[in-house]
Image: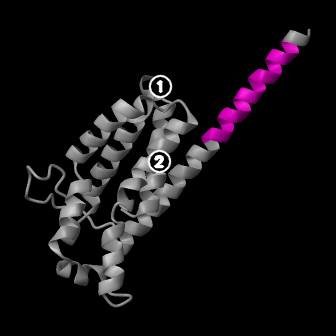
Amino acid sequence: MDVAAHALWTFVIVYLLSQWKPTAGYFNTKKKIATAVIAGFGIDLLFAPQFFYMLTHFPARSDFYQIAPHFPQWMFTWYYINHNYFFIALIAVILYFTYREYTAPATFALALHITMDIFTHKNVFELKPFWPLQQVPFPGLVSWGQPTFFKWNWIILLFSFALVFFHMQYQKRKLLGKQIKAKRKKDK
């Protein structure tokens, strides 16, 4: 899935979880929601070395899937390192001992990212979510780069984002209404 879609899907899902009582405590501040969103797309920013290699070694506008088999092995190794559940566990341990309150949002977002990628990465960049223990890649169901999937993913995502936005506005108005009623009651 593309980086922007990861960020927005993470926001939509984390916002919905923040409204659900059993999970609300994990996502109860704007900082925790922002941490989850940054973690949700940040893992793809670790792909920067591959991107710069591609820019410097292949002609502009090359078809990614045609040139990907010619990438050096280190690019795939780096991809498998930062796109697996063991990497998430390592990040969770580090966060637990440094920024404990952000461990749950970041870990959830990273796991969500990997889980989405398992199903939306096909062909060259199939995931090995338990690498290095699992050497056989998980065959994705669909490639996120296929125009049909890409279009419908963004349509559903934007619709979901709009629903969340309107819900946020409703919650603000509801809170404002309660504050006005409380002030009127106090003034009487």
What amino acid is labelled 1 in the image? Gly
Return the residue found at the far front. Answer: 98
Q: Is residue 154 above or below residue 134?
A: below
Instruction: Look at the magenta stretch and give its main secondary structure.
Output: helix
Residue 98, percent across and down?
39, 33
- Image point (42%, 61%), residue name: 3
Q: Residue at x 30, y 80 (%)?
A: 64
Q: Quadrant of residue 144?
A: bottom left
Q: Residue at x 25, y 79 (%)?
A: 65
Residue at the disc numbered 2: 37
Q: Is residue 178 left or right of residue 73?
A: right
Assess whether residue 128 is covered by the magenta stretch.
no
- The answer to whether residue 143 is seen in the rendering is yes
Is 174 displayed left or right of 127 in the figure?
A: right
Left or right, residue 84 beside residue 25:
left
Pick the residue in front: 4 or 93: 93
Check disc 2 and give the amino acid type.
Answer: Val
Q: Which residue is mark 1?
A: 25
Helix, strand or loop under label 2? helix
The boundaries of the magenta stretch are 167-185
The secondary element bearing badge 1 is classed as: helix
Vertical arrangement, residue 14 with respect to residue 118, above or below: above
Q: Quadrant of the N terminus?
A: bottom left
Q: Earlier in the sequence, mark 2 or mark 1?
A: 1
Q: Is residue 117 left or right of residue 183?
A: left
Asked whether 124 or 171 is in front, the reply is 124
Q: Position of residue 141 (x, y in %)?
A: 22, 61
